[in-house]
Image: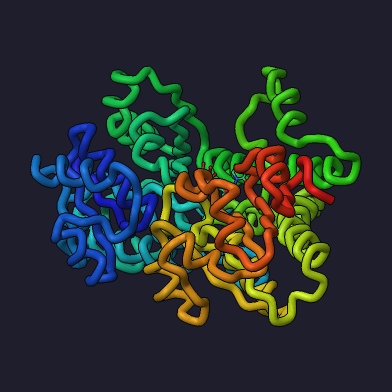
Amino acid sequence: MNITVVGVGHVGLVSAAAFARWGHDVVGYDDDAAKVATMQGGAPWFYEPGLQELLSEVTEAGRLRFTSDSDDALRDAEIVFVCVGTPPLPGGGPNLSYVEAVGRTVVAQASRELVLVEKSTVPANTGRRLEQVIARETERLGLEHAIHVASNPEFLKEGAAVEDTLHPDRVVYGTSSDFARDALRAVYAPLVEQDGCPVVETDVASAELIKHASNAFLATRISFINAVAQICDRVGADVQTVAEGMGHDVRIGHRFLQAGLGYGGSCFPKDVDAFAHLASQVGYEFGLLDEVRDINAGQRAAVIRKLEHELWHLNGKTIALLGAAFKPGTDDLRESPALHLADDLIALGAEVRIYDPVALPNVEVQRPDLPRAETIDAALAGAHAAVVCTDWDDIKKIEPQRFLEGLAYPIVIDGRNVYDPEAFIGAGLRYHSMGRTSVA
Ligand code: UDX
């Protein structure tokens, strides 16, 4: 099929490459000409394992190209995937004006009947709104060809985006016409034939809800285990063993029960807010989600309490923050717990020094005010304490001796539970983790 992907961010770019790998002819469109130029040069504009190789393969095969000319992008499109940003608004809801703008542009430039697919995460009812915009514009411009609205949420995780997209757990699409359903079947047919991937075909509002409900549920699991970690800290239990014991129950499972500094990223914080906002708009107060959000923020407060327990006042103290990205495998800093913690520490008068193996160039651009350390040792040198914020491999491999030699005081707060408490305490460190054995 002739596919156009509008917006070549994390979801759009990886999806475009996957569609091309499945044999479709794909155009990636973005109105950010600099991003398009970077990708025309053959390089993804963000770090994602395996993406460079996949892009080279499909662009060399002539199945994926990029443009910042909307007419060129939309002229031959049979199906258009909307992957533009839906950033949060002050009231908690997402800003859907970019989605609406794509709807108008597609109506103005489409030359045939086509399907417009929401892939960006949007609240239930966005499809109806888009249909309204399209109907009005179609009538105003006196056009004949129909534009069908569909929802096809994306479930990829950053750092594993290529693998998640090429081999998803499931494909979900919601449509309100046979034309749209058949087009989405054709898009995913190669994947379903190769992988036997389960497909959920539904209506547009249910597909939209599946995405919000999935992300809110995963965030709830993380906050649940973080609340359990708080109890573990107080009763001397070990949250990792508790999670392991829970996870053997097949109804619960092991994944997304890793306690720590909490969740960040472009999806969970925004989607929990947006889902609570939508619920409230339709007359249901989803208080559970408020609690999920509060528990998440409380994990940073717990780290500060542990630091204050060791250092008394944080004013004038230097804290080494190990990791800046919101999780390993990405250079994405959006809603990163590390950066929120940095702000909290600075507000208390502390100085921070932040290290990350991949994301420092983004820290330099996005948070030039934060002092950076190019190496782990430079971050530790003379600092009063270190906090593990992101569980990158090189951070996980730090031996107790390296902390002892580098830090001014031997204090380590393991915000991601990556070290062996016995080994660290045994080596003479004041070691604290999140819901596991600590020194105090
Ligand atoms: C998430 C969803 O997993 C994905 O399906 C959706 O499409 C987009 O949002 P992503 O934000 O890329 O993906 O990363 P994810 O691996 O889900 O991690 C999100 C955050 O939760 C990270 O900050 C991570 O450190 C944290 N996390 C994850 C935990 O604190 N504990 C866990 O057990 C798992």
Looking at the image, which residue is at 54% across and 59% down?
Answer: 322
Q: How many marks?
A: 0
Q: Is residue 278 visible?
A: no
Above or below residue 211? Residue 195 is: above
Residue 245 sits in quarter:
top right
Looking at the picture, how far across and down is residue 64, in whole percent?
Answer: 17, 47
Above or below residue 103? Residue 114 is: above
Looking at the picture, how far across and down is residue 19, in whole percent?
Answer: 26, 39
Looking at the image, which residue is at 28% across and 64% down?
Answer: 30
In depth, the one of 384 and 88 nearer the eye is 384
Most extreme residue toward the right is: 235
Q: Is residue 191 visible?
A: yes
Looking at the image, which residue is at 57% across and 59% down?
Answer: 405
Looking at the image, which residue is at 53% across and 56% down?
Answer: 326
Looking at the picture, how far across and down is residue 306, in whole percent?
Answer: 78, 59
In depth, the one of 140 and 405 nearer the eye is 405
Residue 52 lies left or right of residue 343; in this view the side is left
In depth, the one of 139 and 323 nearer the eye is 323
Looking at the picture, how far across and down is residue 399, in whole percent?
Answer: 55, 46
Residue 39 sits in quarter:
bottom left
* Quadrant of the snapshot with the N terminus: top left
Above or below residue 217? Residue 70 is: below
Residue 421 lies left or right of residue 82; in this view the side is right
Residue 347 sits in quarter:
bottom right
